[in-house]
Each structure stands twice: as structure tokens, then as C-alpha cells.
Image (spheres, grey):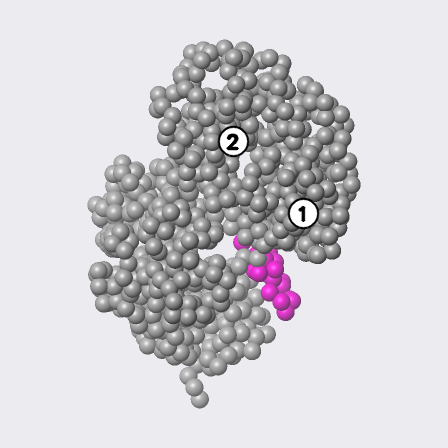
């Protein structure tokens, strides 16, 4: 009779654990009998998760027996394999790790940079205590580490205990899948050279049928959206990095994207609560849909395959984290490296690494030095080594940053308490005070703007500046003209503006106002906005829209000081531009439908009072259609005031969900597919009409409103050909899956050939 394999899971009460059990229940056929023991600290949570795991295991074909306990010693005794997925400090700790570095101008992340160091400070003492228990009760067991920062945890285990350990991460597999998708080739037909460290690795070569296809990948690397790294950098280096390298190459951009927004941990708190609520009492043979949506792909892609390769002695290649040995000759032998290794019953044997460019080599060497110092600092409780570690981290650029960061997490005057078990230093709760700009409405009010005492820069475009410059009561110190909102251009324009300006004034449409907000946000200056058209709501929003890789990204967090809505200025713009303002109001018609659908299908939070307020705005839009069509002062006032109301409501709710849905996804996809700009409100109006038809949601009413307001929405008027329109619709579902921000009708109803034919027949080309 073959020996029964005992697998222990530390952190077994994690809400994603049932996904691991589901994968094992199907894939462990032929692995013999497996005893899976889940260990957790909270009895109630463990019982909910463990009961579901047991039910999932019972329905699968594998010989898998699940039990759960809070007794660590009895669980570890006699184990063959241990999976470590503990989270010391819980989501509260993660939220702190992801937020406190922002105070020092550094992005927060739980695995890299200062956030990763903070997480290590809590985690290493606990993991080392558990591993010493393994040394006594299961000395032959192999530890499979999932806990982040993975290679720091793994280095501490290897250096300070005798436990054998392998690190797993799905990031390399996901990156290779993205490359295969880019090439439209099966992953199995490609061969990759990969080298580096956890969340610091590189694909250096891609072979297909013996030929190097890396040049083709680099030529289109911008299409791998998860990278978020300037394509020119990667083409210059000739290699493709882990997506986590974006934190090193573009920290300012990552910081801008997260500014004023909830951390990932804060987002997951509600998700986990909903998952546990559904798990409790779950009796269906299918997995809970909350588990399906959580998408814990790491179990399927790497964790379970590596575990089963050891149990079955498959001797298969995987990209895992292991002791370097001689695999990478330019790194110390005890460095934890991530590279291909042959995995079998005797563990993981690393293969010789491919050569890398000199600059990449230097980066990896510095990262290895950081991780070594970080582990030594925490274990030895050395403030000095901790400071050196942060100074060696690629995300920390000054000694002042390093000291400030460390003083935020290292117990003051208590070196002997560094890394205290379970400690969460300085954890904070997130609250947002709703601050809104002062909006002044009137005819000719621009001449009264109080700009006489400050050096101010005007950020604008040629046409609105020609109309507005004689109306201002004072001359600016400088005028900056916006050419593009591509991120490189935005950063360049900000650098070109004199450093001694005291206020930023934006005059124009969406691009000019967004650029003004960016300059003010980067420099922490007051910002006044003077819209020259009524077709954009930028003046009322707290974020900034930039373009990156052909897609809109919302970054920053700034509330303008004053907004001056001068009817005389706005009415000088072409009527078409002003009427287009209807688009971001009427989109609520389809967005509310999407929101209700997400509430019904996914349990998303829904607020009937907010929905009612938006329906009132739509009714008022219908009533004000004649004034909007005439571009009267009343029509301009209605649109601008509606924008202000919409943004205030959305700010209080916490997102733009009631106003933006598949309608805006249509618009963004149209820009991406056709590679040309449009008047935003007109494109959103067309998108609202199309999505209303897909929803079977009073599309005729939408069409009537647009006609009476005089909005140009027909593809012919927007310059969209019939073929271009068909391409937009055919690619819309895929674009939504890849870039969509929320659940909409595009996730619920297919865009069929007959639907496309129907829309082509209704619209004018």
C-alpha cells in the first residue's frame, strides 16, 4: 500500500483556499491518497472555509481528504509538504503597506519597495517560528511558499533554518501567456528564456519552431497592457520584464494612478466579506460564483502543478524561486532567484540562466543586495541595516525618503522589538472629505476673475486662448499650449513651465483643463478653471484623464479652487461642441441599467436614492432640450450645473458607476480601434444609443433626446464608416474584458451578427 501524502496549508482559512482544493480535486488523480490539512487562527472563519473545501474535495475524482484545525503542532507533525500562505496583519496591515509610502512620493505595494519591507517586518518572525516547528516535527517536509514578499521570506527561511523551500508565483506564467496571445500562438509551442528574482524577472528570449521571435514581440510590446512600461525602454533593453518593474521605471505614473483612490486591500475587504457570507451554508455542487470571480489563478497556473510534480516525481520544468547555486554566476550562491527549474520528488533543480544585458544585471544585483540587507535587518533587529536596505531599494531615491519611511514603521527606540509578531505599525483608516470647487456662473464674469496679485500660468489651446485673453483682468506670467494628453507629452509640458508660478489657470476644453489640473497637482498649487465649451465635465472631477498606450487612464487627485462658467465665452464656441455636453448626462440612462444588472447578477452595492436623482436629471434633460439646441445661456447653465451635480453625487457615492457604463466603454474602444480623436460627448452619445439598443432599454427615447438637443451622433457626422462601426462592435466585448472597469451588459449579452446588422440599418453612414 502506497504511503499517504500529508499536505499542510498555513493560512488555510484564506477565502481563496477553496479554489486550490477545487484544482487539486481534479488534477491530483494518480497522485495517490492525499491528506490536506488546513490550519487557521480564527476558528469561525476556518470552519466556514474548511467545510466548503471538504465539500468540494468530496465531489472530485482525486483521492483527497480535507480536514482543518487551529492546532499548528498537530497539523505540522509528519507533514510531507507545507504550503505557506499566511497574511500577518490581515487586510489592515496590507492597507497600511499599500498606503504609507505615498506620503513620501513612492507608490505603495505589498511585495516591492517600502510596502514590501513593511510587510516583511511583520511576517518574517512568524514564518521563522513556524519553520522551526517544521524542523522538529516534519524535518523532511518541503515548504512551498506563497506568502509575499516571496523571495525575502524564502531567503530568511533558507538562511536561518534547515527547511527546504520553493517559491511559486503566477506572474511569469501570466506574462508568457500574454506573449503567446500577442503572437496568436499556443503557449506550448513557444520556448522562453527567463531570469531574475521574484517580481524582478525578465523574459530575455522567445523561440518558436527554433526561430527567435523576440523582435516581433518587442515591436508590439505596447499591446501587453499589464506591463504599463514605456515600450521604448523595453525595445532599447531587448527584454520583457515582470509587470512589477513598472514600480521602478514609472513610479510617478503609478503614484498618479493611485492618488486619492482606495488601496487594493481596501477593495478586497468587501469582496472577502461577500465571499464568506456566500460560503456559509453553501450546498450546491458548483463553486460559489464569488470564488469564480475572485480568480485565484495562481493555484491553477503554478502552485498545484508544482506540488503535484513533487508528489508524482514528474521532473517537469517550471519557473520557480530557488537557491541560486551556480545557475546565475554573477549573483551570490545563496541568493533566491526566479528561473526555470526541474521539479520532482527531490525538489527543484535550477537550470543555467540565460545571459542578460549589463544594465539588467546591475538592477538584479542591487535588488539581491536589498533583500539580503532587509532580512538581516529584521532578524538582527538592526535599524542601521534596515536603513541600508531601503537605501539599496530601487524605489527609494533619497536618504531623506529612506529615513522617513523607516521611522514610519520601525518601533522608535526599540530595536529589540523590530518585527514584533503581528505588529501593524501606523495602520490608518481611509476617509475622504468631500471638497468641491466654488463655481461662479454668469455672463461676462471672466473680466472679474481675481488674478491680480499672483504670478499665474495659463494652460490652454490656441482657439480658446484667442477668445479669452482679452477678457482676463491680468496678464499671465506664462502661457502653455497643450498639444497632446499622451503621458510623455503631459510630463514634458509640466517640466517646461517655470518653477516660480504661484497659481495655475486652465482655459479651454477637456485637454486644457486636465493639463492645468495635472500641473497644479504635481506642484501642489491652487488651480482655477475656465471652461470654454460645455461638452466636458473636467472642471468638476477630481481626477485627470491622460492617455497611455492608446487608452484613457485616470490619475491624480485634485479639486480646483474656483471654476468660472462664463456664458459669453462658452457661447462663442461652435454650437456643435456645446451641444455635445449632453453625452455625459444621457449616458446615465444606460449606466443605471448596467448598475442594476450588476446588483442583480453580482450583488454590487446599489443605491436607489442615487439612481432616482439621476433619473430626475434625465427628466430635466428632456425638458431643457430646446434651450440646449439653441445654446442659450439657460442651456449652457443646465449642462454645466448638471455636470456639477453628477460629480458631487458620484463623489459621495465613491465612484462614477451611476453615470458611466458600457456607453463609455464603447467610446473608448472606438477611439482605440479607429486610432483617431472625437468630440467626447458625441461619441458617448452614439455609445449610449447603441448600448440602449443592446439593453433593449428605450433606445428610441435616447434617439429623440439627441435629435431635439441637436447633438451630432450619427456615424456619418462623426466620421465613422460602416466598416469602422462594425469593427468597433465586433471588438467591443473583447475590449470590455481586457480594459472594462466594471460589470455591464457587455458581460451579460452577446453582440450578435443580427444585432450588428440591425444597428447598421438604423444608423446613417
Q: Nearer the viewer, residue 703 or 483?
A: 483
Identify the residue shown where x is 43% and y is 16%. Answer: 476
Q: Is 350 situated above or below 542?
A: below
| Magenta span | 271-292
Q: Which residue bears the numbered disc 1?
A: 722
Viewer can see residue 427 = no
Left or right: where does residue 17 sit relative to residue 378? right
Quadrant for the C terminus in the image: top right
Kindly indicate the quadrant of the structure image that contains residue 626.
top right
Q: Which is more N-terminal, label 1 or label 2?
A: 2
Kindly indicate the quadrant of the structure image that contains residue 154.
bottom left
Left or right: where does residue 247 sit relative to residue 16? left
Q: CA distance from mark 2 to mark 1?
A: 29 Å
Q: Residue furthest bottom?
A: 1
Identify the residue shown where x is 73% and y is 52%. Answer: 757
Identify the residue shown where x is 23% and y is 67%. Answer: 326
Pinpoint residue 406: horizontal percent, then vertical percent. 29, 42
Figure disc tally = 2
Quadrant for the N terminus in the image: bottom left
Identify the residue shown where x is 59% and y is 74%. Answer: 59
Viewer can see residue 484 = yes
Q: Is 685 situated above or below 182?
A: above
Determine crowd level at label 2: few under 14, some 14-19, many 20+ residues with C-alpha closer than 10 A.
many
Q: Nearer the viewer, residue 570 or 450?
A: 570
**Disc 1, SS:** helix
Pinpoint residue 744: horizontal percent, then vertical percent. 64, 49
**Disc 2, SS:** helix
Pinpoint residue 470: horizontal percent, then vertical percent. 52, 12
Q: Which residue bears the numbered disc 2?
A: 511
Pinpoint residue 71: horizontal percent, then vertical percent. 42, 66
Q: Nearer the viewer, residue 640 or 170?
A: 640
Instruction: Tell me if label 2 and label 1 are in contact, CB under 8 Å.
Output: no
Amino acid at each position: 500500500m502506497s504511503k499517504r501524502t500529508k499536505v499542510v496549508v498555513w493560512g488555510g482559512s484564506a477565502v481563496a483556499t477553496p479554489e486550490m482544493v477545487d484544482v487539486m480535486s481534479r488534477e491530483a488523480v494518480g497522485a495517490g491518497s492525499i491528506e490536506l490539512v488546513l490550519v487557521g487562527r480564527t476558528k469561525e472563519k476556518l470552519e466556514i472555509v474548511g467545510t466548503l473545501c471538504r465539500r468540494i474535495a468530496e465531489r472530485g475524482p482525486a483521492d483527497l481528504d480535507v480536514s482543518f484545525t487551529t492546532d499548528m503542532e498537530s497539523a505540522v507533525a509528519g507533514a510531507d509538504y507545507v504550503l505557506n500562505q499566511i497574511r500577518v496583519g490581515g487586510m489592515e496591515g496590507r492597507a497600511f503597506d499599500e498606503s504609507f509610502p505615498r506620503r513620501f512620493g513612492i507608490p505603495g505595494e505589498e511585495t516591492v519597495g517600502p510596502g514590501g519591507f513593511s510587510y516583511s517586518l511583520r511576517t518574517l518572525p512568524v514564518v521563522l517560528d513556524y519553520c522551526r516547528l517544521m524542523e522538529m516535527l516534519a524535518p523532511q517536509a518541503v515548504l512551498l511558499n506563497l506568502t509575499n514578499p516571496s523571495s525575502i521570506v524564502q531567503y530568511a527561511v533558507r538562511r536561518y533554518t534547515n527547511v527546504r523551500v520553493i517559491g511559486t508565483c503566477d506572474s511569469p506564467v501570466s506574462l508568457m501567456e500574454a506573449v503567446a496571445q500577442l503572437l496568436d500562438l499556443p503557449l506550448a509551442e513557444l520556448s522562453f528564456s527567463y531570469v531574475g528574482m521574484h517580481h524582478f524577472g525578465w523574459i530575455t528570449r522567445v523561440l518558436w519552431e527554433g526561430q527567435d521571435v523576440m523582435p516581433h514581440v518587442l515591436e508590439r510590446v505596447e499591446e501587453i497592457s499589464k506591463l504599463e512600461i514605456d515600450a521604448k525602454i523595453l525595445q532599447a533593453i531587448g527584454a520583457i520584464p515582470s509587470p512589477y518593474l513598472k514600480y521602478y521605471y514609472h513610479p510617478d505614473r503609478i503614484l498618479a494612478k493611485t492618488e486619492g483612490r482606495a488601496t487594493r486591500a481596501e477593495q478586497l475587504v468587501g469582496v472577502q466579506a461577500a465571499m464568506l457570507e456566500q460560503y456559509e451554508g453553501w450546498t450546491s455542487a458548483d463553486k460559489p460564483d464569488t470564488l469564480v470571480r475572485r480568480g485565484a489563478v495562481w493555484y491553477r497556473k503554478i502552485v498545484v502543478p508544482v506540488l503535484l510534480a513533487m508528489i508524482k516525481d514528474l521532473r517537469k520544468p517550471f519557473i520557480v524561486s530557488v537557491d541560486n547555486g551556480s545557475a546565475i554566476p554573477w549573483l551570490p550562491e545563496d541568493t533566491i532567484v526566479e528561473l526555470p527549474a526541474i521539479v520532482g520528488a527531490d525538489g527543484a533543480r535550477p537550470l543555467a540562466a540565460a545571459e542578460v544585458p549589463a544594465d539588467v544585471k546591475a538592477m538584479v544585483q542591487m535588488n539581491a543586495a536589498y533583500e539580503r540587507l532587509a532580512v538581516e535587518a529584521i532578524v538582527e533587529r538592526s535599524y542601521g541595516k534596515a536603513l541600508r536596505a531601503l537605501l539599496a531599494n530601487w524605489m527609494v531615491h533619497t536618504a531623506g525618503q529612506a529615513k522617513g519611511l523607516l521611522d514610519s514603521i520601525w518601533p522608535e527606540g526599540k530595536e529589540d522589538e523590530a518585527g514584533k509578531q503581528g505588529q501593524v505599525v501606523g495602520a490608518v483608516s481611509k476617509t475622504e472629505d468631500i471638497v468641491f470647487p466654488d463655481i461662479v456662473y454668469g455672463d461676462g464674469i471672466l473680466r472679474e476673475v481675481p488674478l491680480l496679485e499672483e504670478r499665474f500660468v495659463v494652460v490652454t489651446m490656441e482657439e480658446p486662448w484667442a477668445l479669452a485673453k482679452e477678457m482676463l483682468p491680468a496678464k499671465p506670467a506664462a502661457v502653455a499650449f497643450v498639444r497632446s494628453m499622451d503621458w510623455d507629452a503631459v510630463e514634458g509640458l509640466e517640466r517646461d513651465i517655470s518653477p516660480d508660478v504661484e497659481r495655475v489657470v486652465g482655459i479651454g476644453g477637456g485637454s486644457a483643463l486636465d493639463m492645468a489640473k495635472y500641473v497644479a497637482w504635481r506642484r501642489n498649487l491652487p488651480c482655477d478653471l475656465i471652461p470654454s465649451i460645455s461638452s466636458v465635465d473636467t472642471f468638476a472631477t477630481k481626477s485627470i484623464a491622460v492617455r497611455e498606450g492608446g487608452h484613457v487612464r485616470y490619475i491624480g487627485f485634485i479639486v480646483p479652487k474656483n471654476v468660472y462658467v462664463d456664458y459669453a465665452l462658452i457661447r462663442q464656441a461652435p454650437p456643435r461642441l456645446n451641444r455635445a455636453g449632453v453625452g455625459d448626462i444621457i449616458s446615465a440612462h444606460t449606466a443605471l441599467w448596467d448598475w442594476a444588472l450588476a446588483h442583480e447578477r453580482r450583488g454590487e452595492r446599489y443605491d436607489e436614492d442615487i439612481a432616482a436623482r439621476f433619473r430626475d436629471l434625465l427628466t430635466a434633460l428632456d425638458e431643457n432640450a430646446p434651450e440646449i439646441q439653441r445654446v442659450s445661456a439657460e442651456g449652457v447653465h443646465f449642462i454645466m450645473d448638471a455636470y456639477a451635480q453628477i460629480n458631487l453625487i458620484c463623489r459621495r457615492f465613491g465612484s462614477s458607476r451611476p453615470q458611466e457604463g458600457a456607453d463609455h466603454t464603447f467610446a473608448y474602444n472606438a477611439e482605440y480601434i479607429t486610432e483617431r480623436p472625437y468630440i467626447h460627448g458625441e461619441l458617448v452619445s452614439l455609445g449610449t444609443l447603441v448600448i440602449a439598443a443592446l439593453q433593449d432599454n428605450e433606445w428610441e427615447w435616447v434617439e429623440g433626446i439627441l435629435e431635439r438637443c441637436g447633438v451630432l451622433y450619427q456615424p456619418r457626422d462623426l466620421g465613422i464608416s460602416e466598416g469602422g462601426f462594425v469593427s468597433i462592435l465586433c471588438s467591443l466585448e473583447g475590449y470590455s474584458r481586457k480594459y472594462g472597469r466594471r460589470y455591464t451588459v457587455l458581460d451579460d449579452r452577446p453582440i450578435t451578427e443580427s444585432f450588428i446588422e440591425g444597428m447598421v440599418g438604423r444608423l446613417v453612414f
